[in-house]
Image (spheres, rainbow, N blue to C red):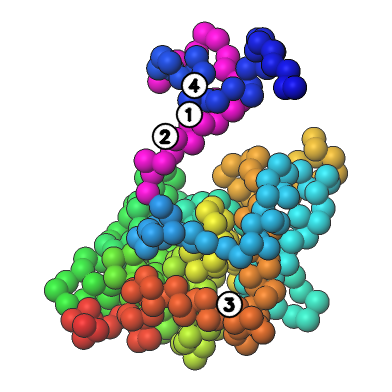
Amino acid sequence: MVLSRAASDTDVSVHSTFASRYVRSSLPRYRMPENSIPKEAAYQIINDELMLDGNPRLNLASFVTTWMEPECDKLIMASINKNYVDMDEYPVTTEFQNRCVNMIAHLFHAPLGESETAVGVGTVGSSEAIMLAGLAFKRRWQNKRKAEGKPFDKPNIITGANVQVCWEKFARYFEVELKEVKLREGYYVMDPEQAVEMVDENTICVAAILGSTLNGEFEDVKRINDLLEEKNKQTGWETPIHVDAASGGFIAPFLYPELEWDFRLPWVKSINVSGHKYGLVYPGIGWCVWRTKEDLPDELIFHINYLGSDQPTFTLNFSKGVQEHHGELPGERHGGEGGPGEDGALQHRVQGRGRAAGGLLAQGPQPARRVRDLR
């Protein structure tokens, strides 16, 4: 016959959560509770509340990837407890980041020799990448002004009024004047002529967008480069370009390979791109790559040794997870520069998601096209 026994305080975790005493009264919302509750009850309460969130798979306005292959999910879960900055303990993870940086740099046509490694860093997203790129431009401009014996206290940066808020954050946080090119009816990206006209001796860079947040248009980076080439020859200012390719950096190389927007243009000195957008990785992962080592001032790189050997670092934060880095590499390996692998990988995925989003692919083939021409 079946033997039964009374429940004791030691086996409360096997009780039905909804029938237990732990859900009979509300838990405090903004204070730590006085008493603990079983892990099963805590999980159920939190999970039930999270059901009020939207479904990420149905959110086409998310600006980030919401689905990855099961194999990538396994890699991510296997590395979720690793610390990005502990390079001695996780040397293979560090190597994975270096591989991704070099793949992206080659994809963007960085002028690298056969044995030369690329200069870049993984970030928590394009916002941090833009902060780092902006700091590099500011420091290089300051160093040049100091060497010339000129004032270096009023740096400015040229952008379109359509830039993402992270550019405004950079300008405010790091005390750089933001000079915006105003948009006009029928032209909703930065006008190259107006942008270069606004450049002066205090301009640290012109920021062009490859995939505007407003409508997905590519700004005409080549036209900006050509105008700057002429102005720099006349003035000797050597004003560079940064390309914010958060959205378009993993679109243009595959769908519009002949479009010149990257390091093929001599005044493009750095590029940021979001792995968690069309890099097809969960948030948050971004990348910033520089044209050459000379474009990233050495004084911005910190060397630490309290986790082991010497470790160079150029980030705004310290500890962070590595799982997105492990998720990025399989996509780049599986897809390849030539397009989809045998299972229909990177290029087909980029094409499909671009059409679903309804932005970049519809508006990207020709830079700076007018919205009404694309309807």
Separation (CA) of disc 3 from disc 2: 35 Å
Residue 304, image x, y percentages:
76, 41
Say what amino acid the circle numbered 3 marks.
Answer: Leu
Q: Are marks 1 and 2 in contact (CB under 8 Å)?
A: yes
Q: Which residue is mark 1?
A: 45
Q: Which residue is mark 4?
A: 19
Separation (CA) of disc 1 from disc 4: 13 Å
Residue at left offset 68%, top offset 68%: 330
Say what amino acid the circle numbered 4 marks.
Answer: Ala
Residue 41, image x, y percentages:
54, 25
Q: Secondary structure at mark 3?
A: helix
Which residues are drawn in magenta? 28-54
Q: Is residue 93 above or below residue 227?
A: above
Q: Are marks 3 and 2 in contact (CB under 8 Å)?
A: no
Separation (CA) of disc 1 from disc 2: 6 Å
On-image quarter of the N terminus:
top right
Residue 90, image x, y percentages:
80, 49
Say what amino acid the circle numbered 2 marks.
Answer: Glu
The disc placed on residue 346 is 3
Residue 227, image x, y percentages:
37, 82
Residue at left offset 67%, top offset 84%: 342
Q: Earlier in the sequence, mark 3 or mark 1?
A: 1
Q: Secondary structure at mark 4?
A: helix
